[in-house]
Image (tube, grey):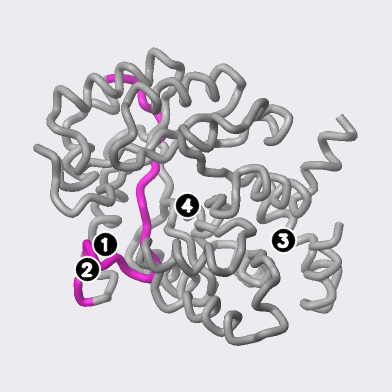
Amino acid sequence: MAFLKDAVSGAGSVSSGRQIAAFVNGYSIEVMPRTAAKIADFSALLPAGTRVYVAHIEGTPIDDMVATASRLAHEGFAVMPHLPARMIADVATLEEWLRRYADAGVSEALLLAGGTAKPYGAFNSSIEMMETGLFDRLGFRRLHVAGHPEGNRDIDPDGSTAVADAALSWKQAFCERTDAEMAIVTQFAFDARPVIAWSKRLREAGVTLPIHVGVAGPARLQTLIKYALSCGVGPSIRVLQRRAMDLRRLMLPYEPADFLADLAAHCADDPASLITQAHFFPLGGVTKAAEWANEVSGAVALRAAG
């Protein structure tokens, strides 16, 4: 595999390539209803049982969200729709959505505030949704929550991670007093150092929830910079800016090789790390991201052997 050869030559050992493959194996990936509609057969693209997040972008009808979730569930995937608190009008609407997802075979959800500036109605945060007790009552056994290693200006206007991290401590306590299986999934980043430092701070604060690190899939550099700016990616955007100044690499597609190599090395050096998994944002296309991740993790070889 070309990527593993490059990774090994960069890191200097075959073990590095194996570390990366082990870290990427079991990855999750994100789709939207409109991007999912372009994939004729997910079972030919993704390893069996892959967790597929369905992103709920503002303006997407709930009918489209449920239809996409139902399709993926029936194709044998673990489906995790986004539930953006600020886009949900009230408790009754949340209950209706959860019942519809449950009827479609879904028992997982990613809870987040959502990207809207003002709430549509009753909810402003994922914590407020969790406090309703609806997830437990309606059989949602796994709940993931959002993490922001480089901060989120909507939550911490000063650029820190203080309020967002305090919210994760609350969610840790929620996990301990309920039977929910929980994990943190982060915004995508391009430099592993702030992600690793953040994970250590959380662990020192008593958080034990596993962290699934957001990884930007292969894409044109211009595309990634656009998404990074619109999504509020923090200091690690400098990785892209430095690359843009290198004329030799400007026109080459970005691949998250170095980012993953650093995360994998950290996990190998620190077995107690909260960082456990890669979650792909397919900014350059679902097919491109999945094929790349499959090659890196060895899923292509495993599927062929099976």
What residue is drawn where x is 64% and y is 65%? 256
Disc with the residue nearer the chain's start (4 vs 1):
1
Report how far apart the C-alphas of labels 2 and 3 lie in the structure: 33 Å
Residue at the spot 46% in from the left edge and 75% down from the top edge: 194
> On the rendered image, what quadrant is the N terminus found in?
bottom right
- Chief secondary structure of the magenta span? loop
Please indicate whether residue 288 sits to the left or right of residue 87 in the image.
Answer: right
Which structural element holds mark 2? loop
User: What's the residue type where badge 3 is placed?
Assistant: Ile
- Pick the quarter of the image with the C terminus: top right
Mark closest to the chain's N terminus, 2 or 3? 3
Residue shown at 22% from the left, 62% from the top: 154
- Point out the stretch of residues depicted in magenta: 138-158
Residue, disc 2: 156
CB atoms of marks 3 and 1 within 8 Å: no
Cα–Cα gap, marks 3 and 1? 29 Å
Read off the residue under disc 1: 164
Query: First in sequence: mark 3 or mark 1?
Result: 3
Examine the image and state in which quarter residue 51 appears.
top right
Comparing labels 4 and 1, the label whose residue is closer to the camera: 1
User: Pointers 2 and 1 in contact (CB under 8 A)?
Assistant: yes
Q: Earlier in the sequence, mark 2 or mark 4?
A: 2
Mark 4 lies on a secondary structure that is loop
**Does 139 appear above or below 14?**
above
Snapshot quadrant of residue 138:
top left
